[in-house]
Amino acid sequence: PAELETFAAAIQDKCPLAVPKAVGFLDGTWRDTSTPGGDDSSVQMACYSGYKKRHGITHQGIVTPDGLMRYLSLAWEGRLSDSAVYLRAGIDSRIPFGYYVLADSIYARTPRCLPIVRRTAIVNNAQRAFNAAVTHVRVSVEWAFGRIKNLFAGAFAVPKDRARLRSQSPGAE
């Protein structure tokens, strides 16, 4: 808890409008994958995002003010939204009672996840100021995911011409 108090104080210093006891920033990231092969169409359906019109996987992460990714989920089906992954992965239960993570507006509000207010739902200047302040400090989670994507870029490389690759694979007819 002493470390959590340090994180909460750091966020309050940078963002006085943030909720006291906010200890980190939550976000999800998407990674393209090749179209899953085989005869099981349920795998293809699970990985296909109708929103992105591609196959992929998604991860959730929590970054603390020191820039470290303190939590990174396993891969989840690409068809799931960030909020759905957060709820299904039980990330809320990993955050100690009385502390919170700040998230973007796509997330559902839970006892330990406080998303910024959707632009269409802003009704006053206080909400607008809160969004601006939190968005400014939340950028650290975007940077952390960017570093991970750069470090492991080869592990997630997807050929541009997937059809050509499949037709050249051994045993393909």
Image (spheres, grey):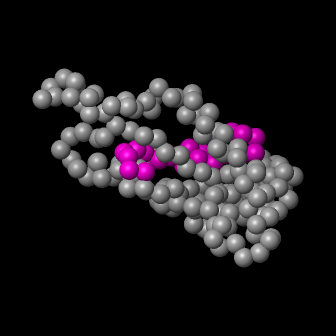
- With 105 as the anchor, is 131 left or right in this view? right
Please indicate, yes or no, whether residue 132 appears anywhere in the rendered image.
yes
Q: Position of residue 124 (x, y in %)?
A: 77, 75
Dominant secondary structure of the residues highlighted in magenta in the image: strand
Between residues 30 and 88, which one lies in front from this camera angle?
Answer: 30
Between residues 163 and 18, which one lies in front from this camera angle?
Answer: 163
In the image, the segment drawn in magenta is 52-73
Residue occupying image coordinates x 31% and y 40%: 35
Q: Position of residue 34 (x, y in %)?
A: 34, 37
Residue occupying image coordinates x 48% and y 60%: 84
Q: Position of residue 38 (x, y in %)?
A: 20, 40
The quadrant of the picture occupied by the C terminus is: top left
The extreme left residue here reads 173
Residue occupying image coordinates x 66% and y 67%: 119
Q: Position of residue 63 (x, y in %)?
A: 67, 45
Query: How many marks overall?
Result: 0
Please indicate, yes or no, whether residue 5 appears anywhere in the rendered image.
no
> Which image quadrant is residue 150 in?
top right
Query: Is residue 19 covered in magenta?
Result: no
- With 13 as the anchor, is 140 left or right in this view? left
Query: Is residue 59 covered in magenta?
Result: yes
Residue occupying image coordinates x 60% and y 55%: 94
